[in-house]
Amino acid sequence: MTTEPTSTHPALENKNWWRDAVVYQVYPRSFVESGGEGMGDIPGIVSRLDYLADLGVDAIWVSPFYTSPLHDGGYDVADYRSIDTRLGSLDDVDTLVEQAHARGIRVLLDLVPNHSSSEHPWFVELLAAGPGSPAWDRYVVREGRGPNREEPPNNWRSVFHGRGWSQILDAEGEPTGYWYLHLFDTTQPDLNWDNPEVHAEFRDILRFWFDRGIDGFRIDVAHGLVKEAGLPDFAYPEDGDPDATPAMFDEDVAHAPFWDQDGVHEIYREWRRVADEYDPPRVFCGETWVPNPERFARYQRPDELHTSFNFIYLEAGWDGERMRKAIDDTITDHARVGAPPTWVLSNHDVIRHRTRLAPVDDATGERDLERGLRRARAATVFTLALPGSMYIYQGEELGLPEVVDLPDEVRQDPAWFRSGGTDGRRDGCRVPIPWAGDAPSYGFGPGSASWLPQPADWSTMSVLAEQGVDGSTLELYRSALRARRESTALGEGPLVWLADAPAGVLAFSREDAGGASLVCALNLETTTAVLPAAWGSSVVIGGETAVWLRA
Ligand code: NOJ
């Protein structure tokens, strides 16, 4: 199928754009608001497309903006084909796509196929219908165990803590003895991917959005849709807290009967066929938390997803050995399937990398955020030189730290409530972006309010405060993205580690087909390092710094 291109911008001609793109993640509620209620929206995103074009990104991925009760920041979708009225309308999405394309920026949306919201018409229908009705088969529903079926069907836990099952109640509020699975919040029932109707519905949702001209989807929990037949109990690691679920990425749970099942690949083959019907073909990026590099690369086989976030690298921290191993494994395993690696350092679910990489003072337990910023900037420059594509999370280009002191009463992460306040701090990376000025909302919206309060000291990190300022993090990102775009040695292609790198320095060279080359070096130590003269000219680089040297 061919859809009319919404623009003839030359950047849109390259069908292989996704192989080395820099994609900017917009978390819509926190990007910029055009209204006045303290929540970001789609017209807000449209109003900042020039900013994104100047930054130099190739595409944006927009986290969910569909109709949703917002029990999990929009990852609880009540209608996959309509827009939450607080965030905009379908017309606004059309404008976003058209205006982004006019600037050569592609648009990826977020697809949430593992679960719907409990307010989705399908789940509402399930609650109204009796056991055994076709409506029940769209979700993972089983009879409970025990004499009165008062125990859940198995021992699976929710990623957000506590039981992974809730009992279905009848119209009088009485327990039915049947339970529905929710690997996340109780308001996020898991869909039953053994049911062909679910497959048909999602193919249709893909086409609905592809027909509107979007360029692809990021796939939520891409490794979770299929569950092992018979839903067997899982032997959780014994030292685990019985109410907590080990993080999805622990080796211990990687083989749980609800993650990374072989059957999930068939779904992506089916979707790839749909994406390939379009001209240009639409693309997918999986949120694929699979810690084994070989199993992870399988998702990127030529007839499946195009790319997936490399969380193995994100988890490597500020540790040269782990970083290098993650890079090597990823490149090797992706080469086997012919796919480009995809790098990411921050997103809306993890601690912002300025804070995550900051060293902790043993005496005070405080993180050194100045060093965190040095490391974050260096990590970004280093990562941008790796082969493949990269995702940037809104606000990291300003050097924003994680907000660690949000008052309990404003928190919204469902894991916060389900863990009794011991976990679920993802709101800290979702605080609205400072655009300008010295008082909240720092230009985020027309008023002073924002749905999560911004820290009092963010005025120096606003876009206005940093733009045009030599050495600011924003200008560092802009110049790195510009240089990356201009360099034929960067993007896809081989990487060669440089054996003569000084201790504590990770260095590799990249070369294009014509022989133009570039060296990238990351000094992980706090002391300066002298780079060998053989790499070009002898260069001294500061501690916790990265450089690109053009030969
Ligand atoms: C991953 C999303 O990124 C996260 O925000 C969400 O809570 C879970 N999937 C469940 O949809």
Image (spheres, grey):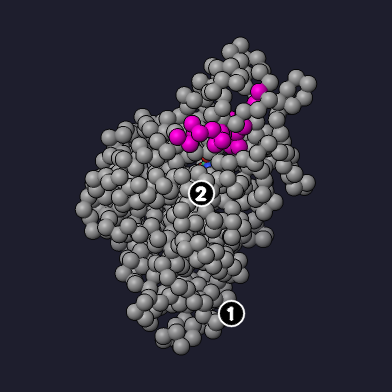
Q: Is residue 283 left or right of residue 231?
A: left
**Residue 488: image x %, image y %?**
34, 72
Residue 80 lies, with reference to residue 99, above or below; the image says: above
Q: Amino acid at mark 2?
A: Glu
Circle 2 residues within 10 Å: few <14, some 14–19, many ≥20: some
- Looking at marks 1 and 2 on the same chain, the residue that comes earlier in the sequence is marked by 2
In the image, is residue 172 part of the stretch drawn in magenta?
Answer: no
Whether label 1 touches label 2, CB < 8 Å: no
Would residue 109 be seen by someone viewing this image from the given angle?
yes
Disc count in the image? 2
Identify which residue is drawn at 59% across, 53% down. 290
Out of 447 and 548, give the one closest to the viewer: 548
**Residue 22: image x %, image y %?**
38, 58
Residue 237 lies, with reference to residue 354, above or below; the image says: above
Residue 261 lies, with reference to residue 89, above or below; the image says: below
Out of 159 and 513, give the one closest to the viewer: 513
Out of 36 and 292, give the one closest to the viewer: 292
Residue at disc 2, CB closer than 8 Å to ligand 1 = yes
Residue 420 lies, with reference to residue 387, above or below; the image says: above
Image quadrant containing the C terminus:
bottom left
Residue range of the region highlighted in magenta in the rendering = 178-200
**Residue 197: image x %, image y %?**
49, 31
| Residue where numbered disc 1 is placed | 503
Identify which residue is drawn at 33% across, 45% down. 214
Q: What secondary structure is marked by label 2?
A: loop
Instruction: Give the spatial CA distance, label 1 vs label 2.
Output: 35 Å
Circle 1 residues within 10 Å: few <14, some 14–19, many ≥20: few
| Residue where numbered disc 2 is placed | 287
**Nearer mark to the viewer, of 1 and 2:** 2
Magenta stretch secondary structure, dominant: loop
Identify which residue is drawn at 32% across, 57% down. 15
